[in-house]
Amino acid sequence: MLKTHKQNQTLIMTLNRPEVKNAINDNLLSMIANEICKANKDDSIKTIIIYGNEDFFAAGADIKELAQKGLFETINDPRVAYWQKINASKKPLLAAVNGFALGAGLELAMCCDIIIAGTNAKLGQPEINLGIIPGAGGSQRLLKAVGKSLAMQMVLSGKPINAKQALQHNLISEITCNTLTLNRAISIAEEINGKSISAVYLAKQAILNGLESGLTSAIKFERQSFISLSDSKDKQKLITRFLKK
Amino acid sequence: MKSRFETINLQIQDNIATLTLNRPESLNSINLLMHSELKSALKKISNSNVRAMVLQAKGRGFCSGQDLTERSSDEAPNLGVSLEERYNPLIQSIFNLSFPTVCAVNGVAAGAGVSLALCCDFILIDESTKFIPAFSKIGLVPDSGMTWLLPKIIGFTRAKLLMMLGESINAEQALNWGLAWQKHPKEELSNAACALVQQLVQMPTMSLSLIKHATLNSYTSTLEEQLDLERDMQQYCGRTNDYREGINAFLTKTKPVFKGK
């Protein structure tokens, strides 16, 4: 269901339930969460990429499973804990999206720090078609990324947007040719791998923190992180090298 | 592998898909059944390691477009739904195939039949071939990608005026305007399409697929963006087996055997 392999210092996680277009059932979600936790403790890994295949990323949650969950099961849904684990990743997460990223699939992509997509990407939150709403941050992350009007349009109509629209509205940061999408994510990850680990960690936290706090306190947080790096070995080494040029 | 359809024929053999429109009695007009069969056929093609495709038709015409007997009711039809649910996905699925496609246009291609041909890479014709946009003659706009594809193929003005008039262009014009890649005598058209597709299937399929994408991308990119794209594509291609095969064959002066990977 989930394949992982390491390429240099990047862990590539490939969703592998092609017969159901990578529908994210509880099992798969828990595996994703566990692999991310494991990678965060593995010093040989600096970045994590989540990928499906050239035709689809993940077409949603497992509807059959969803059908079985009534009020009690949903209140006690183990998925909440899995999502928290994914969101707690200190190491950068990148999503490389080809084809459908719908529902839980898009929520997973939006948990990532960077999303790049191929021209065939279709991103949507179609939960409304089943009489429900996004349940794992879909509506909120979408709102923060694309703004009210498009978020409303997507969530209320359930219709997906294409890669070009996603780029225009800041849901993703780059579009590539479909064949090259994963490669591009790997290139970006490798650029990050070459940077100071502590700086990467703190920069990510500062940006994520900005989504939660007001500007003034977020700038304070950023400043504190900045201060904490002022004596770092990496800083000394890299500035010295820079000045020598 | 052969498949049982009513309005079309599909054959997949040796990595070549041969898709034949098979409603000659109605000049291969496109009805609901043909739409659904084309959809299944293209799905099969996408899952079958195909590296080249021929789209051709039986009978004396290539494709006369939408079957107008399905439009004869008094109610105003929702043509938008027809495009959204049937034509647009069809055109996209052919246009986005990641291998070369050859269309053998025997006789008349009209309306959406023209669009079908336009979304293939190579268009081969014979002396009787005519392309008839036709839409404007019944109060419609050209659809199924014609307004996007035709200007890119024959130029802005020619495309616009041809679509406005809705009149036909003949084989000579099609060849002169770059719409058709080659013209063959009628009795040789099918063989010529076969020969071309045989040539294409032996080429490095990944290169061909990326060339399609890169060429199209050049319409909307700056030079710098296109150079970046070429760089990324070349990096990818340089790691394929076909590249290694190509280089080895060149150095050893032998004929390369490309596998499309």
Image (cartoon, helix red, strand yellow):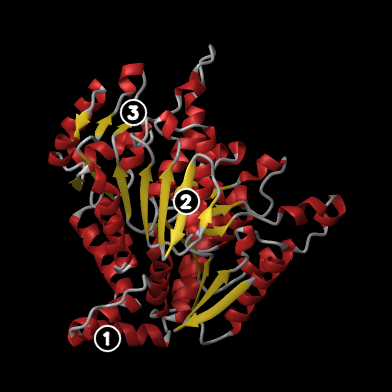
Q: Nearer the viewer, mark 2 or mark 3?
A: 2
Q: Which residue is mark 1?
A: A241
Callout 1 secondary element: helix
Mark sitting on residue B10: 2
Give the amino acid type for the residue marked by disc 2 in the picture: Leu
Q: Are marks 1 and 3 in contact (CB under 8 Å)?
A: no
Whether residue B177 sits left or right of residue A198 in the image: it is: left
* Amino acid type at image mark 1: Arg
What element does badge 3 sit on?
loop
Q: In 3D space, how far apart are the residues under numbered discs 1 and 3 (Cα atoms)?
A: 62 Å
Whole-percent x and y of residue A194? 38, 80
Q: CA distance from mark 2 to mark 1?
A: 64 Å
How many C-alpha atoms fall within 10 Å of the one at disc 1: few (<14), some, or many (≥20)? few
In this rendering, the answer to whether B19 lies above or below B70 is below
Residue extending farthest to the left is: B176
Indicate the secondary structure of the residue bearing disc 2: strand
Question: Residue at left 40%, top 48%?
Answer: B94
Query: What amino acid does circle 3 point to?
Result: Pro
Query: In the image shown, does B244 or A69 lie closer to the viewer?
Result: B244
Q: Chain of mark 2?
A: B
What residue did someone put label 3 on? B142
| Front disc: 1 or 3 | 3
- Give coordinates of residue B173: x percent, y percent: 15, 35
Tell me where residue B7 appears, x and y as whole percent: 50, 39
Q: Are marks 1 and 3 on the same chain?
A: no
Q: Pinpoint the chain carrying mark 1.
A: A
Q: Quadrant of residue A239?
A: bottom left
Q: Are marks 2 and 1 in contact (CB under 8 Å)?
A: no
Query: Is residue A102 something that shows in the picture?
Result: yes
